Image (cartoon, rainbow, N blue to C red):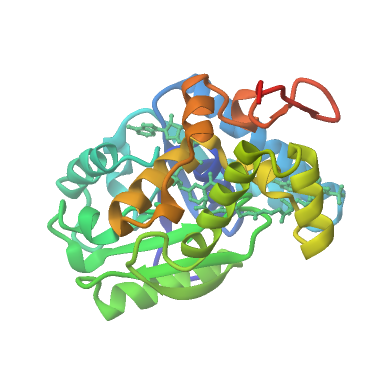
Amino acid sequence: MSDIKRVGVLGSGLMGSGIAQVAATAGYDTLVRDVSQQIWDKARGGIEKSLAKFVEKGKLPAADRDAGLKRLRFTTTTADLKGCDIVLEAVTEDLELKNALWKELDGLCPPATIFASNTSSLTIAAMAAATRRADRFVGLHFFNPVPLMPLVEVVRTVTTSADTFQRAFAFAKSLGKEPVAAKDNSGFIVNLLLVPYLLDAIRAVERGVGSVPDIDKAMQLGCGYPMGPLTLLDFVGLDTTYKIAEIMFTEYREQRYAPPPLLKRMVLAGMNGRKTGKGFYDYAVDPPRVVDLGL
Ligand code: CAA
Ligand code: NAD
């Protein structure tokens, strides 16, 4: 383990809860901040369920699970993270929201604390510039589901110091992840390639190229992908994908990043995918049933 001992996590949604899980089980004292106890209760429940699966499969000793859970604490007060050696931010994909949190913490954390954003598409430089520690600001981009996906993109922006980059890289390794270095361009490596593919799958639905389950089946069986693109969109969250597409489209002004009208309408209807129970599929039933989108 590195000189990092105490880890702060902002946000305990899909990603924040996964990041907190891997940090706590890797031995770090982990403090997670979200806006309500109801949200943490859900996060803690998801973490317990995920750890139970690892124990069941013999991938994690039960004692390590228990020790990991003991190292995990939750708060609604951002200032409680002031004693952390690294703060990993995984709140909603919104620059203003993220920067308000960074500004608050910048005034509270000691100078040595590293700030790391898990943003999918925002520019790391735009967050680093909101703080007085632009040299200690880095991107640490995890993948969903965090406990299972090995990759972390470690993003060095123009102001990130070599020391901060190396410490963040070593920290990702200490979580059992496989880090790669990426430049601070919107979407880094993976989303630069993945997002147009996911948006094209929605355009294929709009055009009636195939049904939702057939588009998924085609990409799974024809290309060997573990999930079809529409299942993956439900998994990532349609609200998050919409925000990512808007940000990448604004950045690159390329049509392939433009959010398709169907995506916007589904988000407006609260059909955000698995996390709200319904997206391209309805998760109230097992197995999930395809939703009639009236197309
Ligand atoms: N914790 C622990 N175990 C878990 C788990 C979790 N969170 N989620 C699933 N599992 C277990 C399941 O219980 C299952 O165990 P068994 O084999 O014993 O049944 C096993 O993992 C496999 O799960 P499933 O059978 O449910 O499904 P699967 O075989 O399809 O694997 C998957 C699941 C690993 C998620 C796989 O479908 C996959 O790799 N999907 C693609 C995910 C992907 O592309 N992620 C990147 C999204 S993009 C992103 O993250 C970046 C961004 O900025 C948007
Ligand atoms: P999510 O909607 O599941 O969770 C966001 C969490 O942020 C919620 O629990 C919300 O209550 C919390 N939040 C909002 N305001 C807050 C505040 N002021 N303080 C603390 N918490 C606050 O979203 P997510 O999918 O976990 O995405 C989080 C970040 O991770 C985004 O930047 C997203 O782009 C990125 N990301 C997402 C994925 C994915 O597959 N979903 C993958 C990689 C990166």
Specify the quadrant that holds the C terminus. Answer: top right
Any part of residue 94 in sight: yes
Residue 27, position in %: x, y?
56, 58
Q: In this orientation, which residue lies closer to the viewer: 66 or 224?
A: 224
Q: In this view, does 88 lie above or below 286?
A: below
Question: In the image, is 130 to the left or to the right of 62?
Answer: left
The answer to whether 161 is drawn above or below residue 14 in the figure is below
Residue drawn where x is 51% and y is 54% of the image: 195
Residue depicted at x 46% and y 34%:
74
Measured as percent of width and height from the top left, residue 130 is found at: 15, 51
Q: Measuring 19% from the left and 71% from the top, which residue is drawn there? A: 159
Q: 99 or 250, which lies in front?
A: 250
Q: Where is residue 94 in the image (x, y as percent from the top left)?
A: 32, 40
- Closer-to-camera residue (70/270): 270
Residue placed at 43% from the left, 22% from the top? 36
User: How many numbered dots are placed on residues in this image?
Assistant: 0
Residue 58 position, x and y percent, is 85, 56
Name the image quarter holding residue 97. Answer: top left
Residue 163 located left or right of residue 281: left
Q: In the drawing, does residue 34 fall left or right of residue 223?
A: left
Q: Is residue 234 visible?
A: no
